[in-house]
Every structure is written in C-alpha cells, then in structure tokens.
Image (tube, grey):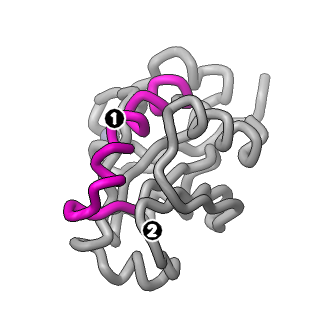
Amino acid sequence: MSKPIHVVCPHCDSVNRLPAERLGEQPRCGKCRDHLFTARPIELDKVSFAKHISNSDIPILVDFWAPWCGPCKMMAPQFKQAATQLEPRVRLAKVNTEAEQTLGAKYNIRSIPTMALFRGGREIARQPGAMSAADIVRWTNTHAKV
Ligand SMILES: [Zn+2]
C-alpha cells in the first residue's frame, strides 16, 4: 500500500485523499462524484489557485497566459495535448493573467506565455515562451521527476 495523496477536484475544489495507485483508475471526487482528472487543463482564479497549489500532492503545471497574446493562443492546443500525456501524474492548469492580475503580479510574471511548475505549495521551475506539446512533457518530466 502506498501513502495516500491529496488531489483537489477540478469541479468543486474539494480536497480528496486517495491511494497513489488509484490515480490511474479514473478516480472520482468524493463530494461531487465527477472525475478528478479529465485530461484537460483546468482554469484557475485567485481563490481556486490557492486551494489547488497548497493542497495538491501532485505537481501542478500552470500556463500563465492572456487573451491578447498570439503565442499563448498558439501554445493552447499544445498545452491541452500535453495534459493528455501528463495527467494524472501532474495537474495542468491555466491562469488568465488579464483576469487574474493579482496572481500575475504575485508570481512576478514578466512575459507570457510563462509556464511554472508547483509542488508542495511552492514554485520549483519556470520557463517563459511557447513550447510544443512534446517539449512541455519533456520539460515537466525533467523538473517534476515524475
Ligand atoms: Zn468534486
């Protein structure tokens, strides 16, 4: 038996506790019963961001983007594709820095897109600039060691 890990539900933001080996078995949320992983990046705002970052035992890869940014739009499908390969070992999330300016300021996002990897409530790696899905997966595997 492996140690239970904490995963935050992308639908209701409840903190779920489950054995690590159950991650790959399409686990459902204990509260809202929806899937804990949908193979898609989730959108986070200031409140849900804090909840996910501080309560998740799996690494969270965040794409800081903005609607007016061309390279961000080009990277969006790549990021989405990376989610299908990285979940459920890693949670992928997007933060719209135009709507969530306090988050952009808090993490000192100077250029977009910027990807930042969080684990255990803190940032462990950061990479500015658009990347392909393959590069996103490779970069994440290297830094998250998952
Ligand atoms: Zn839920």
Image coords of residue 97 (percent x, y):
32, 70
Q: Residue at x 58, y 45 (%)?
A: 6
Residue 77, numbered circle:
1
Res 29 seen here: no
What type of secondary structure mainly makes up the magenta span?
A: helix
The magenta span reads: 64-86
Res 79 seen here: yes
Question: Which structural element holds mark 1?
Answer: helix
Image coords of residue 109 (percent x, y):
48, 76
Question: Which structural element holds mark 2?
Answer: helix
Image coords of residue 99 (percent x, y):
22, 72
Asked whether residue 71 is drawn in magenta, I would say yes
Nearer to us in this view, 129 or 45: 129
Rendered view: 84 above or below 5 = above
Asked whether residue 110 is drawn in magenta, I would say no
Q: Residue at x 55, y 50 (%)?
A: 60
Of discs 2 and 1, which sits in the foreground? 1
How many residues crowd around disc 2 within 10 Å: few (fewer than 14), some, or many (20 or more)?
Answer: few
Image coords of residue 105 (percent x, y):
43, 84
Q: Toward which corner of the image does residue 119 lie, by quadrant? A: bottom right
Q: Amino acid at mark 2?
A: Ala
Rendered view: 59 above or below 47 = above
Q: Amino acid at mark 1?
A: Pro
The residue identified by callout 2 is 50
7 on left or right of 140? left
